[in-house]
Image (cartoon, rainbow, N blue to C red):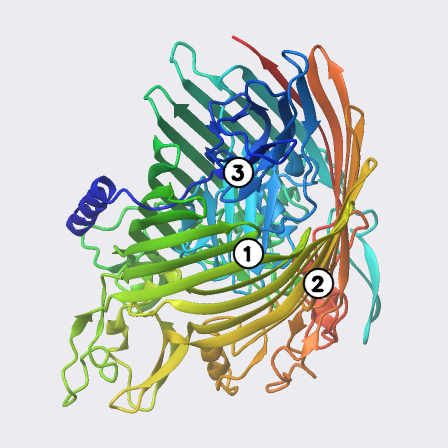
Amino acid sequence: MALLRRRLLLLGVLLLFGAQTAHAQTGKLTGRILDEAGEPLIGATALLLGTTLGAAADENGDYIILQIPPGTYDVRFSIIGYQTKVVEGVRVASNQTTTLDVTLAEEVIVGDEVVVTADRPLVDVSLTSSMATLSREDIAVLPVQQLQDIVNLQAGVVDGHFRGGRLGEVQYQVDGVSVNNPFDNASTLNLDRSVLQEVQVIQGTFDAEYGQAMSGVVNAVLRDGNPERYEFSAEVFMGEYVSPGNDSTTVITRFDGPQTVALFPHISDIDPMTLQNYQVSLSGPVPFVPQTTFLLNGQRYVNQGHLAGLRVFRPTDENDFERRIFNPTGDSALVPINFNKQWSWLAKISNRSIPHVKVAYQAVGNQIRRRGYNHAFRLNPDGLSIPRQFSIVHGLDWTHTLSDRLFYELSFRQNYFDYKDLKYDDLGTPPPDAGTQYPLPEDSPYYEPGPPRGDANYQEGAIVQGVELGRFVQRTNAFVSKGAVTSQATKVHLLKAGYEVQASHLEFGSPGQVQQIVADGVQVLGVVRDTLDAQVRAYNPLSVAAFVQDRIEWRDLRIRAGLRLEYFDANATVPSDLANPANSIDGAPESRPKPTSVKWALAPRLGVSFPILDRASLFFSYGHFYQMPGLGQIFSNADYSVLEDLQAGAVSYGVLGNPDLKPEFTTQYEFGFKSEVTPFLGLDLSLFYKDIRDLLGVEFVQTYTAAEYARLTNVDFGGVRGFTLALDQRGLGPITASIDYTLQIGVGNSSDPRETANRAAAGEDPRPRQVPFDWDQRHTLNGSLIWFQPGNFSLTAILKFASGRPYTPSIGTTFGSELETNSGRKPSNVIVDLRAEKFFDLGGLDWTAFVRVFNLFDQHFANGFVYADTGSPYYTLDTTQQRNPNPGRLNPPRRIELGVSLRGAFTR
């Protein structure tokens, strides 16, 4: 902890004296103000109504407004002697420039004002890489509930994989600061759509201000409270999984003929309370505190899931396995197994009482109890553990405007994550003379039920007594400091420079294992605390980054150029001689723990967009992207003393961690074309290639005694190439439509870092070779159709087509029956989602009644599990599996949600 305190002191010094880094979640508005003769109107003003943001035109008629929160604005242009013009519906996006040129006519009638509506371009021809920006209005009409639902609708995203990358390669940010858990580089926060002002999904070359990501960035911008009025909203919906007839389905087996099985057991037991969601939001000015606004949001979500077990047995049942006498004492009640229960909350307070300064505090939290389906415990569901997770991300933001062309920002965040997966917290009272291994105490909750047990000849080996013994905890406490200095140095150059610091304290492991031990010559269930996998270990890594970036906007030419420097210190040790890893080989050179080396990486980024027609442009982007593997992979099983007894000729395929890993590395190239083909149709084409190196993999190390062990290192590689074609139709009456198609080919030598060791342990060829990634979905088609009548109704349909991903086929069940890895293809699938809304006014409030249907046509397969011997999710040559199929292998059935929401506002 002393080291952690020193690092926090370093973080504070950087915060005070290096106030320069970037995370601005604001946009820019620029343009020219001219008269009818085309002459500049010097001194004419541009003002965003409802805000204090504005600017005056210079000698060329040019104006620039910085620090505009994302949203839609009405902009007033005025100067004495000329007609005032208000342009309504001007959309500004984070980290983007909106160009708005206007012409003012001479004033004929004093006070005359002209109101026009801004044209919203079908495609943004100024972008230098692939990016999707969804405003609050865009999100409102989609059949989505959470941030992750929005992300998965984007072209090139396949179940969290961005353009063929592995999971954990995406940086999730809220208001410009990372909310990823450093343990696995994944985000655990669930943000309801009601609190989102804007969402950006970047898959192309992203700016140098973003790091610790190789595949993409997701930026979520939270709403601010309105300083003039209070706004509130509430939403309630309930739902159920509906799949008639699939709780008893007849299948044809190869040897046993027709059999009655269940695709989804108990699915016909309709309960509209299976899904419940309650959400409320309130925002506005803080009473009696000037220049201060707030946003509060709370949500309770319960999904009991579509898969349940029957409580035929209880964990404490006593069965005679030798004589196969079973004594169930359960009540045969349905018990949800794959459920998800969450509390989510958000608080944001913003203050502008100090001139030219905005201070904001925000906190986003989640508490989750979520469990996946376990087919083995279907008759003893109470024996399963319930994973629990608590996370909170909170901190301060400071924005100081030094002039209309210069401002800086500072942020300080604490990202705290606490995860537990164990049946019972308590192991009981240890005996007075207990060492690091002792028999399980009688007051331990594990004592009476004991370990899970079943009989292969009873219900296909279902667990009929006992509880899960696995115990795992993980806590991460990360302190993040960021800042930004932004300068519109000239009309052409918008400069940024800065740093980012993250000091993490990580603890993970097992707080004591419950397993079989030998005590007094007898094998009993005991507590083990002295092995590597029965301990909770702590680590304190540090990462720092600095960058510089220039956004060049000269006429219609757009260039984004940047350079990012990254630093990582694992603050751990590794053996100095890997051939004598535990320093236990007699006569071998001495091996001592040596500090891990500091890792440096320099990442250039470049994006260029230039027009070729009035509303068409070409763009090119190139970038280097580095990312350290998740800390859980770096430090897992990283104590090489466990190899002390590894003997000559022995092979250990338990993969050891490696705190001295290098960052993984991706080079990405992208070329694209954007065009407004007609006033109603936009086209966006992008071609991309990713060269992926230094991926996490496994190497085999031979000791001086000819023994062999496996450890993680940077040896895996791969590549992704493909293109995305998108068409967007708007402006033809009440109907809008969009469609996008992605072809991508992703190959590499492995899909999982431990795959090489697993192949070797199974007696297969471990040598690296390029095969399709497990998530290599070659063809993806997304389409949406929206019929919107303001004040009346809206109807939204979304279609998602996916070609089959690869799997490894087999020609039987014997050893060596598997064919080439990922040489087979699963079936294709189509999923359709629907949302219908009816708007009405009641009691001065805006009400919406809605119905959402997910998986409208009840598609049971969506690139999930298939049987290796048939390539089908429904049929196998294995009669045991055919008689008792695991329903967790299938896509969740049709889900119907019915609900109502309301919105209102009032002034104080």
Of circles 2 and 3, the one toward us is 3
Where is residue 374, by image quadrant? bottom right
Q: Please tell me whether mark 2 or mark 1 is closer to you in this view.
A: 1
Disc 3 target residue = 30
Q: In this view, does 567 lie to the left or right of 734?
A: left
The mark nearer the N terminus, 2 or 1, is 1
Crowding around mark 1 (Cα neighbors within 10 Å: few <14, some 14 to 19, many 20+) is: many
Query: Pointer 2: residues within 10 angstroms few (<14), some, or many (20+)?
Result: some
Check contact, mark 2 vs mark 3: CB within 8 A.
no
Residue 128's disc number:
1
Q: Which residue is under mark 2?
A: 885
Q: How far apart are marks 2 and 3 (CA)?
A: 62 Å
| Residue type (three-letter) at the residue carrying disc 1 | Thr
| Separation of residues labelled 2 and 1 (CA atoms) | 49 Å
Q: At x 63% / y 24%, what residue is drawn?
A: 86
Q: Estimate the x, y position of residue 396 in percent, counting from the top left.
A: 34, 33
Q: Which amino acid lies under the numbered mark 3 shown in the image of this protein? A: Thr
Q: Position of residue 536 (x, y in %)?
A: 30, 55
Q: Identify the mark nearer the N-term, 2 or 3.
A: 3
What's the residue type where badge 2 is placed?
Answer: Pro
